[in-house]
Amino acid sequence: MKVLHVAAEIYPLVKTGGLADIVGALPQALISAGADVRLMLPGLPAIVQGVEVQSVVCVVGAIFGAGQVTIRIGKVVGSGVDAYIIDAPYLYKRPGSPYQGLDGNEWSDNVQRFALLGWAAAHLAAGDFDPSWTPDVLHAHDWHAAMACAYTACRPVTTSSTVFTVHNLAYQGVFPVDDFHLLHLPSRMMVPGGLEYHGQFSFMKAGLKYAHRVTTVSPNYAREIATDEFGCGLDGVIRARGAAVSGILNGVDGEVWNPTTDCFIAANYSADQFDGKAICKAALQLEMGLHSDPLAPLFSVVSRLTSQKGLDLLLTALPGLMEDARTAGTQLVIQGNGDPVLEAAFAGAAKAYPGRVAVRVGYDEPLAHRIIAGADAMVVPSRFEPCGLTQLYALRYGTVPIVRRVGGLADTVMDATHEAMQADTATGFMFGHATPAALGLALDHAVQNYRNPAAWSRLIQRGMAQDFSWSASAQQYLALYQEVIRSR
Ligand code: ADP
Ligand code: GLC
């Protein structure tokens, strides 16, 4: 089976969040399971640099405002996965993130930049660019690639089946109606039953409407996005797709996130040989300027700082955690970037509690590994969370997750209720309401368990024994691909 994955990010070349980790790992997992998988990626500077031995597949010429578009093929450094690169310097050769300039503003021509990604993928899938390789399935990720489903649907004959995966419904790619002509799509698609969305048009909606199958990254989030509370205005569209929408849980890339081989951390360790964990904790306390104290419960956060992640709840709960006698000595390390208000507030907290709260504002992959390895617990208090990866990495590193009961967090963590502790099934701590008080109770519960070394050790051992490798999820994707091909 030939499958084309289309996305704007890929670890380790371009990453703003978990999407990149998935696009880096899932194709490899599918290849191991026997599929013939290639990628299509925009020619962002790091992607052009990180894809080797590029040869020209097809010269497209001028389109979407770019004077010259060329499709090349090469291999992603490291994984060796074949990738088609859309070489369009006018649209993609820029510093900054794939979505924003260095000033933090969205690129003003994102409509063209990501229409081109979808358009090129649809043409490749139809055999227009590389007749030697036409995929059976075109698999588009998030709004950036969603237009591939619309461009495929508007062809008189569609060859490939399309699958669209929602990694985060909150980011939708909505543009003014005046830009519709830039898409080169028939006006019959600019209707409420098509791309039209409250007087504008939406790339996310294009994926949801026109893909043959829609998936999201956990079964629980698949149920949630069909509700008003989590549907971000698109729950009606999602409900209308009925059984065409399903959830497949993300996996963990065991090559990148593995405490027995991780070269970023102070000492390697495993569930059986756990001594290295204490070395990682001591090294982290030293690096971050925290008091050197092997017995202090060390909580951690590695996250984008956005309202999604609920870290304002942690800020409000923090004085209680720091000052209450029940949680005396607790430490917190936070690594994140995003909302300047949250960045400043956490920097203020570090000043208020020197030696006990440490903050690193910025993006730093090796530090994320050192934090996840060195901390005792990882806090993920999200308001919504399609899957969440840091709690999965934490489980693998013997770092106990404390999460809100939402989205993929609810699918992947087993709450340490009295019953679960008795039954030996608990792997972490959960809270329900998105309030500082509810989070505070969960943090307190975690500290009390931490002070019971036998109970804490069982939590760690069960967490490390969980299997979140890609193999099971890759099989589910293959079954979905087979089902969609058969049904058409
Ligand atoms: P999301 O995709 O919503 O940001 P996930 O939990 O799925 O959330 O994935 C986040 C990914 O980004 C993880 O790999 C995490 O380690 C990483 N990450 C988040 N913030 C930072 C940061 N400041 N520095 C390094 N890595 C980060
Ligand atoms: C999104 C979601 C996150 C998910 C990631 C990868 O960024 O916010 O929950 O883990 O995509 O699918």
Image (cartoon, rainbow, N blue to C red):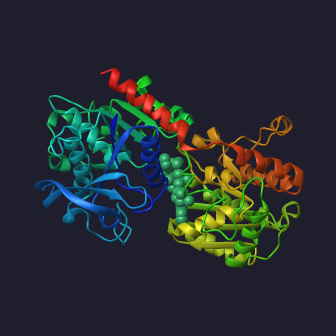
Direction from residue 424 to residue 345 in the image, left or right: left
Residue at the location (72% across, 78% down)? 286
- Image quadrant holding the C terminus, namely top left
Q: How far across and down, in percent of the image, does residue 71 sit?
A: 20, 54
Direction from residue 320 to residue 470 in the image, left or right: left
- Compared to residue 465, the image places residue 485 above or below, namely above
Residue at the location (36% across, 35% down)? 163
Q: How far across and down, in percent of the image, does residue 101 sit?
A: 34, 68
Q: Is residue 229 visible?
A: no
Direction from residue 149 to residue 398 in the image, left or right: right
In the image, farthest residue toward the top: 487
- Compared to residue 210, the image places residue 469 above or below, namely below
Q: Is residue 37 visible?
A: yes
- Image quadrant holding the N terminus, namely top left
Q: How far across and down, in percent of the image, does residue 201 sit?
A: 27, 43
Which image quarter: residue 357?
Answer: bottom right
In the image shown, does 235 or 159 lie closer to the viewer? 159
Q: How far across and down, in percent of the image, does residue 3 sit?
A: 34, 39
Residue at the location (62% across, 56% down)? 258
